[in-house]
């Protein structure tokens, strides 16, 4: 059967329509007294609509579990993409393996010498290059030649610690985070490019075949053993060090979650023969949309996006969007004339002028007069701010970040409780690890705290003692190499 694997990332800022705040033309008519009330009423309404009290979190978690189930049956619900990864790393993997990662702005290539249970990762070597912009609209051959060349360069480097067994081909784990229709562990048809890529002649083709042809042109005799997305690679990488890892989450520009599922709990894979009886399922939870506390600002952002109505959970919780939601709120507040005086800072009309790292930087400002918030607002919006305006801006940031982190936590509980319902005790009856990677989770302490608080509130302190949420930093590179090992064409006993 064929399934559509939707990549966990979205395109970079598209040519957004300029969203005019409702009050723009009225600014000069308003007295300050009216504006003060208006600004605070915008904030009050925002806080009410973004609130995530326990009943809301519970509904989101329950709806997530239900949508996972529906997706596994292929009825409706989440995409729930079978990854065809059926064997997780055991720790016994031995030999030299490669990993390629094409997904965001960077292309990474890694090689790792695995030494089995005792030695584990003996040596690694990696290269990272940003993808030249012109390649994003080049031909399929040009893009894959670039990848194969990067691989060839790394493979050609002499390193005593990194050795391929005589007579064996180099094997590759390929992390490719674009929408792929996957039918086996080592093949997948590109459905469409995202994230600003417009490479001609690749859509509808097997990306593994494209890479194989490019490697042949480079005279490289290597083979792709595993094609995966970044969440799946992260799970594999984390599981290698800790057998209790059951779930992996990406919280970066976009978001995705995957987990280990029993084959007989996947109705849409009926008849699939599996030796392990398990498979990693990529939930594609960014597509989730039920019971979310959304506002007019979310709706405006969605309407102006290149994929209106899609990826609503992703648009509420992931790094690409949190800053943009805050910008829309500030624009509306500015239009009341109070936040930044009588004029609306022109820069605030520019989509994505505020990034999530900006919200994060402002929230780390501990100075008494919020000097850091003031200078960031000046840098980004070219606007002088009063102390009271800075405090309001911080409250807006906190409201949006709290909602995002809390909902991410509810999503995690949704996955855990679905697994627990299927097999009592498998999650909450023992130590369970959720591995998380991505720039948003890694760099935003408030987001992390809100997420953890939400998980704890939902499952209670007793169960949360057994639950470990850990940062699996860059685990996806080693993870992809490990999956190349477990799916090696050569006979192995790991
Ligand atoms: P990708 O998801 O493209 O693979 P990363 O996992 O590196 O990329 O995450 C990058 C994203 O993380 C950025 O788009 C941004 O939203 C978020 N991010 C990066 N740095 C910070 C920061 N300091 N504070 C908050 N968010 C950040
Ligand atoms: Mg990434």
Image (spheres, rainbow, N blue to C red):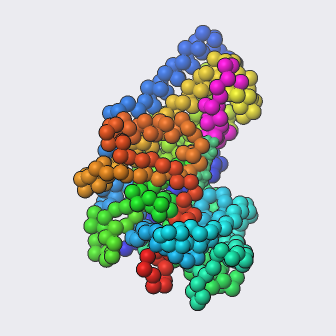
**Image vertical order of residue 120 relative to residue 285, above or below:** below
State how many labels appear. Answer: 0
Q: Residue at x 38, y 30 (%)?
A: 53
Q: Give the range drawn in magenta.
A: 352-371
Quarter of the image where the N terminus is located: bottom left
Camera-nearest residue between 403 and 349: 403
The image position of residue 473, as x and y in percent, is: 56, 54
Q: Residue at x 61, y 64 (%)?
A: 102
Camera-nearest residue between 307 and 22: 307
Q: Residue at x 49, y 27 (%)?
A: 46
Q: Does the magenta stretch include residue 353?
A: yes
Camera-nearest residue between 162 and 414: 162
Quarter of the image where the C terminus is located: bottom left
The image position of residue 360, as x and y in percent, is: 61, 36
* Left or right of 418, for residue 314: right
* Left or right of 142, for residue 235: left
**Image vertical order of residue 250 relative to residue 390, above or below:** below
**Image vertical order of residue 462 relative to residue 377, above or below:** below
Would residue 217 be visible to someone looking at this image? Answer: no
The image position of residue 196, as x and y in percent, is: 64, 58
The image position of residue 132, as x and y in percent, is: 74, 62
């Amino acid at each position: 059967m064929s399934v559509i694997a939707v990549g966990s990332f979205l395109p970079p800022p598209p040519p957004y329509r300029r969203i005019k705040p409702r009050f723009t033309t009225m600014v000069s008519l308003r007295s300050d007294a009216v504006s003060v009330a208006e600004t605070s009423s915008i904030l009050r309404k925002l806080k009410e609509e973004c609130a995530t009290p326990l009943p809301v979190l519970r509904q989101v978690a329950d709806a997530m579990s239900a949508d996972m189930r529906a997706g596994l049956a292929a009825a409706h619900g989440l995409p729930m993409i079978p990854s065809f990864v059926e064997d997780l790393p055991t720790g016994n993997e031995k030999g030299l393996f490669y990993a390629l990662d094409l997904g965001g702005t960077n292309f990474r290539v890694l090689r790792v010498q695995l030494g089995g249970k005792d030695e584990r990762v003996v040596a690694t070597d990696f290269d990272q290059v940003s993808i030249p912009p012109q390649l994003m609209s080049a031909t399929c051959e040009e893009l894959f030649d670039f990848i194969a060349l990067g691989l060839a360069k790394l493979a050609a480097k002499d390193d005593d610690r990194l050795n391929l067994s005589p007579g064996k081909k180099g094997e590759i784990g390929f992390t490719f985070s674009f929408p792929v229709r996957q039918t086996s562990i080592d093949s997948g048809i590109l459905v469409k490019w995202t994230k600003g890529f417009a490479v001609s002649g690749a859509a509808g083709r097997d990306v593994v075949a494209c890479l194989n042809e490019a490697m042949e042109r480079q005279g490289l005799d290597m083979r792709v053993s595993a094609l995966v997305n970044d969440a799946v690679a992260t799970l594999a990488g984390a599981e290698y060090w800790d057998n209790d890892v059951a779930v992996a989450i990406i919280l970066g520009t976009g978001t995705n979650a995957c987990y280990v599922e029993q084959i007989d709990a996947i109705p849409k894979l009926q008849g699939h023969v599996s030796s392990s009886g398990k498979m990693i399922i990529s939930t594609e939870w960014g597509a989730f949309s039920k019971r979310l506390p959304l506002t007019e600002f979310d709706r405006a952002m969605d309407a102006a996006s290149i994929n209106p109505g899609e990826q609503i959970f992703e648009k509420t919780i992931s790094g690409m969007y949190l800053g943009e939601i805050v910008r829309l709120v500030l624009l509306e507040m500015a239009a009341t004339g109070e936040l930044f005086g009588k004029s609306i800072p022109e820069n605030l009309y520019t989509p994505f002028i505020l990034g999530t790292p900006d919200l994060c930087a402002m929230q780390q400002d501990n100075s008494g007069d919020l000097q850091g918030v003031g200078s960031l607002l000046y840098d980004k919006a070219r606007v002088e701010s009063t102390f009271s305006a800075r405090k309001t801006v911080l409250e807006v940031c906190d409201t949006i970040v709290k909602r995002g982190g809390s909902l991410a936590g509810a999503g995690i509980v949704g996955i855990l409780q679905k697994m627990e319902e299927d097999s009592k005790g498998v999650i909450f009856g023992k130590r369970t690890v959720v591995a998380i990677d991505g720039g948003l989770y890694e760099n935003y302490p408030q987001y992390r705290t809100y997420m953890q608080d939400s998980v704890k509130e939902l499952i209670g302190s007793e169960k949360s003692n057994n639950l470990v949420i850990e940062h699996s930093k860059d685990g996806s590179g080693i993870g992809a190499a490990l999956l190349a090992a477990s799916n090696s064409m050569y006979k192995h006993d790991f």
